[in-house]
Amino acid sequence: MYRAVTRNIEVQVRPFYLEDRSEPSENRYVWGYQVTIDNQSDEFVQLMSRYWHITDGTGRVEEVRGAGVVGDQPELNPGDSYQYTSGCPLSTPSGIMVGHYTMRNKRGETFDIAIPAFSLDLPGTRRTVN
């Protein structure tokens, strides 16, 4: 489990390899990741957008930006949590993802919260620093 806290909003990520959706012989490796956003602050927030910086095992970078997550822009009152699952295909058997969510509070202020860097590694293989 990977974890980051920004402005008392915790983001936890649990990545997992999707063997049944991967085709290593065709250089296609697919991971899922489950994200939990826990609003431990004392203010209402809404997740407006996401940004991902994805680096594969060869150092190739892909950036992904978009509104919300999995078609949703969740609203979190103090003490609320939101969880979703998504995925990421790579052409290499390892990689790293990191990013941020842009949040908005009731005053209309926007700010970014960190998504912790997390490693995507095939089960049973030696981990290397990418």
Image: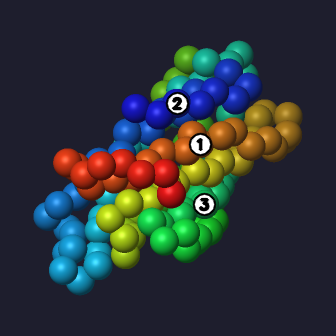
**Measured from the top left, where is residue 2 in percent x and y?**
47, 34
Q: In the image, what residue type sits under mark 3?
A: His
Q: CA distance from mark 1 to mark 2?
A: 8 Å
Say which quarter of the image contains residue 111.
top right
* Residue under pointer 1: 115
Where's residue 127, x and y in %? 36, 48
Residue 70 picture quarter: bottom left
Q: Badge 1, how many Cα within 10 Å: few under 14, some, many 20+?
A: many
Residue highlighted by disc 3: 53
Residue in the foreground of this view, choosing between 121 and 22? 121
What amino acid is labelled 2 in the image?
Arg
Q: CA distance from mark 2 to mark 3?
A: 17 Å
Which colour scheme appears in the figure? rainbow
- What kind of element bears circle 2? strand
The dot on residue 93 is none
Of helix, strand and loop, which one carries label 1?
strand
Would you say residue 36 is visible in this rendering?
no
Marks 1 and 3, Cα distance to the nearest angstrom? Answer: 10 Å
Q: According to the image, label 2 marks what residue?
A: 3
What percent of the width, then of the height, locates residue 81?
Answer: 49, 28
